[in-house]
Amino acid sequence: MRFEVSRVLDAIERQLSTDPVVARGVVDLAEVIRLADLDGGRPASLLRLGQVIDALARHLGEDGVAVYVVVGRPLLSDAELSSNERMVIRRWADDGLVEALPEAGNRVFEVAEMTGLPVLTRRDPGRWLAPKPGSGGAVLVGTAGIGAAPQHPMLSRLWRCPQPECPAFGRPTGQPPPRLRAGVPTCPRHGHRLTDAGPRPAAVPMVVRVDGVVRQRFAVTERPVVVGREPTEPDSVRIGPWLNDDQLHWISRSHLVVTLTPAGIEVTDTSTNGTVVHLRTDPQGQADPHKSDTVRLSRSERRVLGEHDMAELYDGVQLARPGRWHADGAAQPGSVMADAPTMALRLLR
């Protein structure tokens, strides 16, 4: 059972991000772990974070959704969590996968206001999205929007923390929002005033859809991102787990390279069988009637995608900006709780 629980926690870990470009919701971990009515189990369980992630995935009709998790330091010594759970949370904090700070307070709401992300909470269910028990698992109830929103000017800058090796503000990309104290940008973890290190590198979200369901969301910067069946490059996008036999046979291990250039999102084919780019003029997917509506790329050929264009690696395997598709629940997203033993939620201590 403990091995299975560890696998679930590993699956949850893969859905954690403090990058506002990638995250789809914000949670206060101290609140989420105590939503005992989600499973009828013990007073506090880290596995409930997985249930909330699954609820967000179903709400969006997307797979692989990431959440921005805020952790107050008192949680690291919470006796209602097992020693293994406390160790896991500490590792997430040290690796910068979650935002750790002395007291969580209203930080989740500050992050939401600065990024436009919804908060998954019962503290203000009318304004945000509240996790509740449902017939098929946890569900989200509320009126918060999920779409993109204007982001705070602080997110246009790159910040540096004077604390050496700060996991949040010691990295050049994917930084979380700074905490504002009397309007001064501050490191939430260390409490130090941040220094302005210049403009933040541009980042654009992209998504991969397989058979009608968004399976992966990732940020594209000037640093190339490889998309393929089983790429080995760092920070690549692996789509093999969602492909059927025909798709696995056709799509190359490293099929496509995506890069943000001054001209826009550029895709470069690196495959054996090529990539088709569908040219579209509006969000509804309309093609220009006076021009060819597709371009086929062969190995080493590249093209800048228009705002509404879509790259297709094989039938049903598509890449585009998030606004190109609306979640339609065409299929059930995968669950991070798939490996959870039935009794784990109640018995793990």
Image (cartoon, helix red, strand yellow):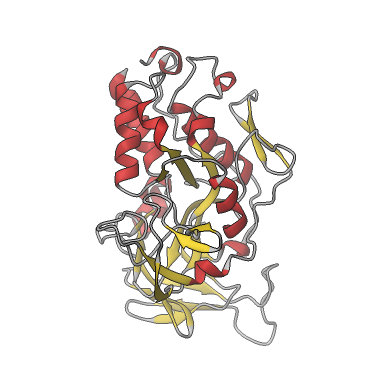
65 relative to 288 in the view: left or right: left
Residue 310 image-quadrant placement = bottom right
Task: Give me the residue at 29% from left, 31% from top.
Answer: 87
The relative height of residue 230 versus residue 335 in the rendered view (above or below) is: below
The relative height of residue 283 versus residue 300 in the rendered view (above or below) is: above
Is residue 349 in view from this perspective? yes
Residue 83 image-quadrant placement = top left
Nearest the viewer among 252 and 125 is 125
70 relative to 82 in the view: left or right: right
Location of residue 120 in the rendering, given as x and y in whole percent from the top left corner: 60, 40
Nearest the viewer among 324 and 95 is 95
Residue 102 image-quadrant placement = top left
Is residue 211 in view from this perspective? no
Nearest the viewer among 280 and 75 is 75
Marker count (numbered): 0
Location of residue 140 in the rendering, given as x and y in whole percent from the top left corner: 65, 36
Task: Give me the residue at 69% from left, 38% from top.
Answer: 124
Q: Quadrant of the N terminus?
A: top left
Location of residue 129 in the rendering, given as x and y in whole percent from the top left corner: 66, 40
Location of residue 283 in the rendering, given as x and y in whole percent from the top left corner: 68, 69
Task: Give me the residue at 42% from left, 45% from top.
Answer: 16
The relative height of residue 204 versus residue 207 in the rendered view (above or below) is: below
Q: Quadrant of the C terminus?
A: top left
Which residue sits furthest bottom? 290
Nearest the viewer among 186 and 295 is 186
